[in-house]
Image (cartoon, rainbow, N blue to C red):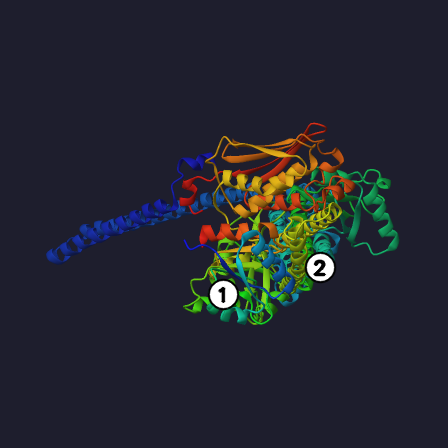
Amino acid sequence: MKKFSRFNFSPTIYLLVSVGFAFFSYILIQVVYSVENQKYINSKLLDLQDQIRQTFQIHFLSLLLWIGIIITISLLSRAAVTRYIKNENRLRSILNTAVDGIITIDEHGIIEDVNPAMERLFGYSPLELVGRNVNMLMPEYYYSRHDKYIQNYIKTGVAKIIGIGRESVGRRKDGSEFPIDLAVSEMRIENQRKFIGLVKDITVRKEIENELEKQLKWKVSLAEFNLAVDQSHEIRNMLERTMQVASIALPASAGACIALWNGKINDISICSSTFMEEHEQQALQRFIYSTKDVPRMISGCKPVIKSKISKPDQLLVGSFIKSYLGVPLCVENKVLGVLFAFEGKSRRYCQDDVEFLQSLANRAAISINRVNLHDDLQSSNALLAVQQGEMRALLDSTSEAIGLVSPEREFIALNKNFYEWFGIEPPVVGSLRFTSFIEQANLIFEKPGLFLSTISRSINDLTGQFEKMFIQVWPERRELKIFSTPVRTDDGHHLGRLFVFHDVTREQEASRAKSEFVSTVSHELRTPLTSIYGSLGLMNGGAAGELSEQAKTLVNIAYQNSERLIRLINDILDIEKIESGRMVFMNKPTLLNTVLTHSIEFTHTYAEQYGISFNLDNSYPQAMVYVDSDKLVQVMVNLLSNAAKYTIRNDIVEISISRQKQKMRVAVTDHGPGISRQFRQHIFQKFAQADMSNTKKKGGTGLGLSISKTIIEKMGGEIGYHSRINHGSTFYFLLPEWQPANDEEGN
Amino acid sequence: MKPLKKIMLVEDEADIQTVAKMALEITGGFQVEICGLGGEALMKAKSFSPDLILLDVMMPDMDGLSVIKSLRDNSSTVSIPIIFMTARMQSQDVLDYDQLGAIGFIAKPFDPMQLSATVKKIWEEKG
């Protein structure tokens, strides 16, 4: 081989050299022959020697030609042999270094040759293979199929493997099986049929394919799961479908279960499982309640993997469970429960398995949460509907018309009376528009402008309450007292303004009737009283002539009691006016000193009978107040007469005026016994009197201070007192001082 | 100012007529003419020509408010000062009296010994 290798030219070069030499020889012969021939023609005089010499030359040239041909053939043969050897070496190298296994068998399946790759693939050495049946490289269940392929092909020529190739299964020397890609081709050597098999180990490819297939299957499963649970609003369906997907797609060959947790310790319950038998279900329950994996998953929100149950009794589900994977059902950091997938054999769960089951659990948790929220929402809606119904019934059962208006000027709520009273047809859908009501208000109210401005102003007022009277004139007449207040939710959100229309027509009528009655009765009482009081007054004053002492005493008693009766009637009328709100105040700027002087004038005769005198100490003779002077005189007379009545005899009642900030303070001070502590809390109440026996003696009605307090407060002032037992009492009132500037501002 | 001498008292209650007339005559020295009904007052106002009329409000034939309107509508009586003497002393009533042109009002029951003084005081202030 080394020897040949020095002249290791390519066959083409050999061929070119050989052909070139032959061609050169031929040209040489032709040239020589032509020259000689021409010479022969031209000279035609050649001699015999020349002919011999020519003949010799021709044979010599032919010989040269033959030698060239032989050399050429020899060179060509040698090149072919070299090439063959080289190709064989190359082929052998290829076979020896091929990754795939190559095996040659005869038509009986006997192995004739194998390459080294076969040893690597199957674990047999070539010596162990050659001469034996190829079946040894297949699982037993392939034997008969393989034989049938070969026999069938030999008989019919129909190829199933041969010349086609297919995936099959190989069996190694150690008995393990692995997927192979097998390509078989046929050849004939010395009229014998041979089969050459090309065996490729496709374990990795199959693993990748299986992995891809699994991933695809999981994705499809999850997508189908999503689609199914999205349309479902029943938790049970959802749980069963979750387990179904876990069982089939993961897979969980021994079953699956879901236990839901209600948020309390140890309060977990199995909601769904693939275990049908009762004893299995009981065992599963024991497992769920006893395993530490459940609290671990709940607290850590992490999956639990048990690839191999070393102590089967730890798993109470049954000895057929050899491994399991558990994942929590988590949504928004909240654990809803756990999902277990069980296997009947040991299983090394990979990260993908955990991720798939966790994805499934997460989606299930989201759906469960959604259904729970949906259920909660439905429950809330149902509850809300009930509450709304109750609220509606409550609103409708009230005797008022009620409307709640939002800050955006829309009705939030209206009751039945509102529609009925104002002759408004309730809309079929939604609530009455506020603007529609406003438009109708022109027809409904006697003073629509005042009503609308009041309502409009109040809607923007977030704090104030008010109560006002309005007269409704359509569709029927009503006197309405409107109470309005802002409405806030518990968290302080301003909801709107509430308007409560209270029909006070009857009350007003009753009140008017009462007032009329009181007025009439008072008048009817006054008429005879006028005669009595007048007659007694004239007699007491001596207008009817001189009376005896006894007659004078009796007339005086009658006269004073008729006076008392008059005061009582006047006070009752005042109280009635105050309570019915019909006491009218005609306030105007008034010189305080004038009021005090008049009051003293009116009272001094009365006080004189008790030996009482008044001392007015006025440092502010020009001070003015904005009051109804008659009413203020009434108050002052009451305070002075009280002081005269209740102080010691011959006392001097002090009347003083002072200024406190922008208010004028008028105080009436006596030096009497003072007001008992028991009486102080009742002093401004109606018919309150310090001492009944004393009252009888003094002839009061017990209404004076109550009336005085109301009058002072109605004029923007305040009234009070302070008293010391055995030292006397001071009653005072404060009224805003009137300044001319106040008048310009609208007073 | 014309002195106050002739007073016409329009009052339907006979007892009050007596008491008021006596009080006015004794304590004030006035010449008092009594009318028991509103319609009568309209006629006597022309014939008697009082310096002042004391007018009750609640009367059976026509009330004091109608009487004062009629007196104000008649040129011969339009200038006679009128004081209401009434038991109706509600605030609205007082406003009405004022608007109808009364120069004052005296509440019933009145103090008979002060009646003449009160009438004179109102007369002097507003009459």
Q: Report the residue at 54% width, 65% height from top.
A: B64
Q: For the view shown, which residue lies furthest in the left direction?
A: A43
Mark 2 near mark 1, Cβ–Cβ under 8 Å? Answer: no
Q: Is residue A173 visible?
A: no
Which image quadrant for residue A633? top right
- The percent coordinates of residue A492 (x first, y second) are 59, 45
The answer to whether A718 appears left or right of A243 in the picture is left
The answer to whether A289 appears left or right of A734 in the picture is right
The answer to whether A18 appears left or right of A522 in the picture is left
For the residue pair A498 and A429, the one nearer the viewer reads as: A498
For the residue pair B10 and A268, the one nearer the viewer reads as: B10
Q: Report the residue at 12% width, 55% height from top.
A: A45
Q: Report the residue at 64% width, 64% height from top.
A: B14
Write down the chain letter for disc 1: B
- The percent coordinates of residue A313 (x first, y second) are 87, 41
Q: Secondary structure at mark 1?
A: helix
Which image quadrant for residue B84? bottom right
- The percent coordinates of residue A457 (x first, y second) are 49, 53
Write down the chain letter for disc 2: A
Q: Report the residue at 78% width, 55% height from top.
A: A274
Task: Give above or below for A631 relative to A234.
Answer: above
Query: Given the image, on which type of amino acid does mark 1 rest?
Result: Ile
Query: Given the image, on which type of amino acid does mark 2 rest?
Result: Glu
Residue at mark 2: A234
- The percent coordinates of residue A422 (x first, y second) are 57, 68
Residue at mark 1: B68
